[in-house]
Image: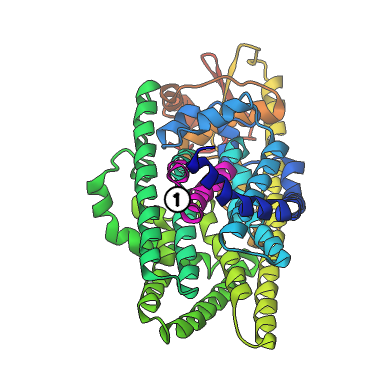
Amino acid sequence: MPVWLRQEKEQWTPSTATFRRYAGLVLKTALLGMFLCHALFVLHGYTSPDGTNEGLYYYWNQRWALSIGRWLMRYLSAIGGNVVMPAVFVAFNAVCTAATVLLLADLWKIRSKVTLVLATLALIVAPSVIEQNLVICVGYSYGFSMLMTTLAAYLVLARTGWLDFVLAVLCLTLGLGGYQAWIGFTSGIVVMTLLLDCAAELPMRQLGRRFAKAAGMGLLGGGLYFVILQIEIRRFDVALSSKGGLSSFGAGSLLANLTQGVLQAYQDFKGYFTTGPNHTGKALLLVLLGTAVLLALAWLRLVRRRKSQAVVMAVLALLLPLAINLVDVVVPGTINTLMSHPMQMMVPFALVLAERETGPVWWKRLVRFGAGAAVVLVCWLSTVVAYATYQTVAMAYRYVDTLTDAILMRVLNDTDYTSDTRVLIAGLPDESEAQEFNFLYDKSAYTKNMVFWDGTAGVLGNWKHYIYDYHGLWIGEVSTEEYYDIIDSEAFAEMPVYPAEGSLQLFDDILVVKLEQEPPR
């Protein structure tokens, strides 16, 4: 056996033992937690407008994914024949979460089963997971990318071979190809690990080597991601979208956005741990404050013995929010709920700090009990939010279903309608009507449009897909030019608004339903 291969085997032997010891527990926790928290999504199957418009049953929008830099989605989707399988995708993400926690268990030397269970549940109930489910047509990419970006950090920190470094670069490249915002998992885990190293009084030279190695991996992985992206957009003749500044990304844009991006990273970090429905922000703030206290105590112990490591530890602690929200620095804008998942890693990190706390027995027990209780509170409040969210989205769909049934009844009974007639519903329903008496709305993590996009995209895109997916009728396609010609016409202006008599009128081969006096433009 070659020397390098024998060394690799020796490195992986203790890790394999750790994986075997805890795999069953963590996997069962992930699957059961995912089911208990997100069962209503699998039961209802309702998605956000993205889910409807990009393929409720069959994912067909690969060109758009490529235009926003997610070149891996095309190939991940092809594994399942582009068929959207909600229960399978949700279970897959649970498995990816379990694998992520197992990697952290080995990297951070977690030996407490309670810590592993709570860390797994904390990632499962995160608000980002709710939104991942609401775009289930590409839901698998989030779990896969989380696993890949975590594996990249694990390989570069827990392994020393050149092959492991190459694999780390490739894992980061694949992770970014699935979802770029997950760069925060890699950079966040690296900084968290270095903080734990400082607390363990790792020599400065080793700290420096580990940081340099991780930084090199990040630069190479990011560079390879962009190389593949350029190849893919030329291969499929797709222009990069301006969304998130991707089409204009470069050294100049990065420097121009640097100051604002750094500030935004800290603002988004603050927002995540202070706001949130059903008091989840307050519970997360409790976890964050506990983390800060434990880091401060570790720093006080360190500064007495190793001042240089103490300085490094203080700097790393200040940089941690920036590392987790690194995507803010790379592209302009703010981190939305879907992109926020790396910030939830602060919860497992807090549990690890509590597990490593030193002192009298009573103090260690108090710290671990307090950390565990705070995380249980986060998980419980977040589970309530998940149920409230899925029910709230379902209410919006039920309202639109009722309205659509009435509209289609009028359309199908209209004397001008034939099987060759195209249908244009000129306007969008007021989805807020569905929430007027919904006591769950304030607890929902998703309060944006739940069925339709705004503007002409909603009128010309969502309506046709929604009616076909949920009512089985294809109403045909109307071009943007035809749409503007109709709503700008004098005949349309004279039509009353639905449901009044005369609110349906034929324009050539297009039967128009006037749903709003001034339809979106």
Q: Is residue 503 magenta?
A: no
Q: Quadrant of residue 399?
A: top right
Range shown magenta: 142-167
Using the image, determine if residue 141 lies above or below residue 277. Answer: above
Residue shown at the point (42%, 55%) measured from the top left: 334
Which of the image's four quarters has the N terminus? top right
Q: Disc 1 marks which amino acid?
A: Ile
Residue shown at the point (60%, 57%) measured from the top left: 106
**Is residue 112 something one can see in this rendering?**
yes
Q: Quadrant of residue 357?
A: bottom right
Closer to the camera in the image, 80 or 446: 80
Closer to the camera in the image, 510 or 198: 198
Closer to the camera in the image, 172 or 267: 172
Q: Is residue 420 left or right of residue 395?
A: left
Measured as percent of width and height from the top left, residue 490 is found at 43, 27
Residue shown at the point (57%, 35%) measured from the top left: 515
Q: Is residue 8 left or right of residue 35?
A: left
Which of the image's four quarters has the C terminus? top left
List the residue tagged with mark 1: 183
Q: Is residue 161 magenta?
A: yes
Measured as percent of width and height from the top left, residue 392 is found at 68, 52
Closer to the camera in the image, 455 or 308: 308
Question: Which is the main secondary structure of the residues drawn in magenta?
Answer: helix
Residue extending furthest toward the left:
252
Q: Residues within 10 Å of mark 1 (few under 14, many from 20)?
A: many
Q: Secondary structure at mark 1?
A: helix
**Is residue 495 something one can see in this rendering?**
no
Measured as percent of width and height from the top left, residue 309 is found at 39, 75
Colour treatment of the image: rainbow
